Image (spheres, rainbow, N blue to C red):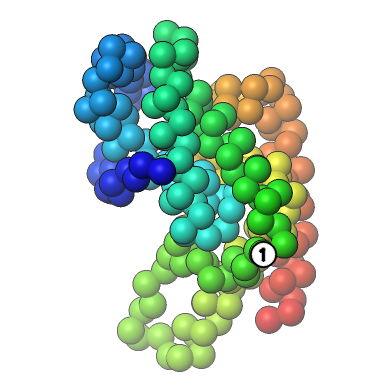
Amino acid sequence: MQACEVAVVEAEPSESHRNLEDQELILRCQHGDKQAFGLLVKKYMKRAYYAALGFVRTHEAALDLSQEAFVRAFRAIKRFEPGRSFFTWYYQILRNLCLNAIRDRSRHARSFSEVGDVLLETVPDPAKNAIETLEQKERQTAVWEALHSLKPHEREIIVLKDFQGHSYKEIAEILQCPIGTVMSRLYNARQALKKKLEGYLHEL
């Protein structure tokens, strides 16, 4: 599998400007310009990594799957329909890979606490004592455990809205369902997470 270099995306342009840029890059890709596709990867790799992490729990798996999805996207780029959102199209590829990985690796899943710092990273305050720091870590781990005890579709919509900040319209496009359905699913997922989290925190 080809590897994609990991880089930090410092800032993102507006949605309309980003889509216009994407269309230009995609046209270049469809004419064989690999460098243009590299620019798309650089633009979306961070978002893709976190999307994958929301499914598969571990840093290594999220990195591998997001990279593999980019490879597959490049191979299929000539079939990309002009006017579509690149990330929405790419996300469908990534989502299928992640769901397959979940099915294939469910018997070998590790505790999500192993990567609990990745999305909810907190820097301990030197002024805090050891007990407060420990409690903070325990709460953080509880959030991750609660999140990953949800059903995949519940976890997915929470990651898309609350971790990645997608709008209801964007999520509707990504999941290919009406906005009303997105709102209903998100409400139910948040309620499920709240219930799970209360149970985890009660055990601390």
Name the residue nearer the viewer: 61 or 166.
61
82 to 130, vertically: above or below: above
Residue found farthest to the front: 1
Q: Is residue 166 left or right of residue 126?
A: right
How many discs mark residues in the rendered view? 1
Q: Position of residue 204 (x, y in %)?
A: 68, 81
Residue at figure coordinates x 40%, y 85% from the top left: 128
Residue at figure coordinates x 42%, y 34% from the top left: 70
For the N terminus, the image quarter is: top left
Name the residue nearer the viewer: 201 or 88.
88
Residue at figure coordinates x 58%, y 22% from the top left: 173
Q: Residues within 10 Å of mark 1 (few under 14, many from 20)?
A: few
Residue 122 can be seen, yes or no: yes
Residue occupied by mark 1 = 108
Tell me the quarter of the picture where residue 75 sits. Answer: top left
Residue found farthest to the bottom: 130
Q: Position of residue 182 (x, y in %)?
A: 68, 30
Q: Position of residue 17 (x, y in %)?
A: 30, 19
Q: Position of residue 95 (x, y in %)?
A: 59, 37
- Tell me the element at label 1: helix
Residue 12 can be seen, yes or no: no
Residue found farthest to the top: 82
Residue at figure coordinates x 37%, y 72% from the top left: 123
Q: Is residue 35 left or right of residue 27?
A: left
Amino acid marked by disc 1 = His
124 to 87, vertically: above or below: below
Tell me the quarter of the picture where residue 32 sits. Answer: top left
